[in-house]
Image (tube, rainbow, N blue to C red):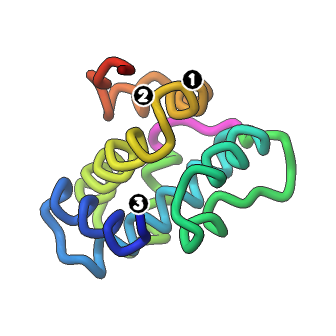
Amino acid sequence: MAELQFFEKVAGRAGVAPDTAQALTVATLRTLTERISGGEAARLADRVAYELRDYLTKGTEEPEAFGYDEFLRRVTERAGVDPELAERGVRAVLQTLHPVAGHREFTDALAQLPAQLRNLVQPLPRAP
């Protein structure tokens, strides 16, 4: 899926303008990359549009340990939105990332997140 299509899907799912969807996508992917291992981030980066890969690039293997509230705080700050919109945006980005990354890669990455974040995208469709 091309970068522009990704932003359009996020915009539709979150109910926001495309420029806001872009800001939410970048903020969510950067924060996700901080929270998961470098190997998982690299596997996700291999699956997304070339233009989105830099947002999933991590300099270290080790993930940072932070919870749901800190994840949303970082997205809120990076995207310049309020916390409610940040939560909707994270949900929309993760839901859009799922089919792009593939079920197995996505669930492997999701397994490294706190339960509250995993719950944002539940229920996940079954793998084909």
Element marked by disc 2: helix
**Residue tagged 1:** 111
**Who comes first in sequence, dot 2 or dot 3?**
3
Q: Quadrant of the C terminus?
A: top left
Amino acid type, label 1 = Ala
Residue 66 on the magenta span: yes
Q: Where 98 falls versus 53 (above or below)?
A: above
Quarter of image, res 19: bottom left
Element marked by disc 1: loop
Residue at horizontal 25%, vertical 77%? 18
Of the two numbered discs 3 and 1 in the rendering, the one whose residue sits closer to the viewer: 3
- Kindly indicate whether the residue at mark 3 contacts the one at mark 2 (C-beta within 8 angstroms): no
Quarter of image, res 82: bottom left
* Number of residues whose C-alpha sits closer than 10 Å to that of mark 2, classed few (under 14), some (14–19) or many (20 or more): some
Question: Which portion, as a residue range, is magenta?
Answer: 65-69
Residue 21 in the figure: left or right of residue 66: left
Amino acid type, label 3 = Met
Residue 30 in the figure: left or right of residue 42: left
Q: Position of residue 13 (x, y in %)?
A: 18, 54
Residue at horizontal 47%, vertical 37%? 68
Quarter of image, res 80: bottom left
Q: Position of residue 4 (x, y in %)?
A: 35, 74
**Who comes first in sequence, dot 3 or dot 1?**
3
* Magenta highlight: main SS: loop
Q: Position of residue 120 (x, y in %)?
A: 32, 34
**Residue tagged 3:** 1
**Residue tagged 2:** 118
* Number of residues whose C-alpha sits closer than 10 Å to that of mark 1, classed few (under 14), some (14–19) or many (20 or more): few
